[in-house]
Amino acid sequence: MDARYPIRYSSHKALHFQFERALDISRLFMTKQFLLRLLPKNLRSYQPATLSEIFQKELSRNEIYEIMDVFFYQHLPWQFVEHRKYFSKNNRGFGEDAFHSMWFLLFSEFKPVNCLEIGVYRGQTLALWGLLAKHLKYSCNIECISPFSSAGDSVSQYKNEINYLDDTLKNHKYFKLDDPKICIEFSNSEKAKNFISQKKWDLIYIDGSHDYDIVCEDFESSLNNLAPNGIIVMDDSSLYFDYTPGKKSFAGHPGPSRVAKKIAQNRLTLLGGVGHNNVFKKT
Ligand SMILES: C[S@@+](CC[C@H](N)C(=O)[O-])C[C@H]1O[C@@H](n2cnc3c(N)ncnc32)[C@H](O)[C@@H]1O
């Protein structure tokens, strides 16, 4: 930056920003049009509904996934699309656009108050929950358990050179969100189990280790501390359900998928699945 020309610089920067934004919008528009053309005819007249209503329709998992994907471009408020874009950059987050639609619909319908995420990485989902509660104008208590290190498992490796705690907090600041309540532990430690049992949770998102034994423990401690009508969302868990992932999707890992199919499905009501996420409810 040339300090002698601050005004010129800032107007240049603003122009550049507007140009980038116009490009983003045109890209989104083209993607939306493209997706809509790919959509089977029976889905084209789709109107927004609640998550439960969508799950109750007689649709395949692949059709539900397409609805969520199109919802992202057609109906999701712009700030959530921006949020997704921010976390998609520089490996800041995992996930798929369709999951943002799922969380938007889930929060809009159930308005969970006590929310826990197991396995944080760099805070994409935590920050999304914070933004959703703000958007829906209700007070939400967001907590999490994660080692905030590069600790992986038998199927995942994470980069060493990131300070995961600082990064998660920085990402919250970027979106002007309060810090979440953080427990720096592996989810199966005594401290973490005590942390989980401090309250009854309306929503628990299990997305930490992908190893079967640990996912089993995560599921048990989550179930034991789930509020009436509470929801558990299991990530990476659709390998043994009838879902055929397309190019930009992924069905999951064996550990969480086994727990979802063999255990969670028998202990809770499976509302439905969006890609590799499965949404269970205590009824
Ligand atoms: C797939 S990432 C989570 C992504 C995050 N849920 C999101 O939506 O952005 C898995 C995270 O779980 C952490 N992890 C690994 N083992 C864990 C355990 N036993 N308990 C809690 N977290 C664990 C990893 O270090 C990593 O940060």
Image (spheres, rainbow, N blue to C red):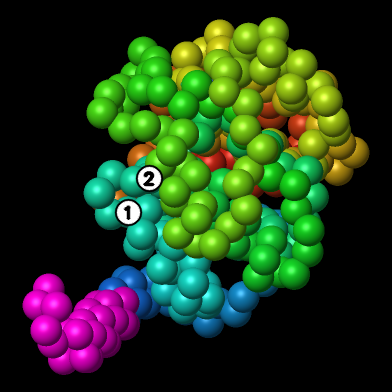
Left or right of residue 138: residue 237: left
Describe the element under mark 2 as helix, strand or loop.
loop
The residue positioned 41% from the left and 41% from the top of the image is 167
Label 2 neighbourhood size at 10 Å, few (<14), some (14-19), many (20+)? some
Would you say the beta carbon of the disc 2 residue lies within 8 angstroms of ligand 1? yes
The residue positioned 45% from the left and 59% from the top of the image is 174
**What type is the residue that disc 1 sits on?**
Ser
Depth order, front residue of 7/91: 7
**What type is the residue that disc 2 sits on?**
Gly
Q: Which mark is residue 178?
A: none
Tell me residue 184's x, y (percent): 57, 23
**Which residue is labeled 1 in the image?**
88
Q: Is residue 42 visible?
A: no
Q: Is residue 146 visible?
A: yes
**Which residue is labeled 2 in the image?**
93
Instruction: Name the quadrant containing residue 281.
Output: top right
Depth order, front residue of 114/241: 114
Of all residues, the one furthest to the right in this rendering is 228
Q: Which residues are magenta?
A: 1-30
- Note whether 150 is above or below 232 in the view shown: above
Tell me residue 256's x, y (percent): 52, 24
| Quadrant, the C terminus | top right
Would you say the magenta stretch is mainly helix, strand or loop? Answer: helix
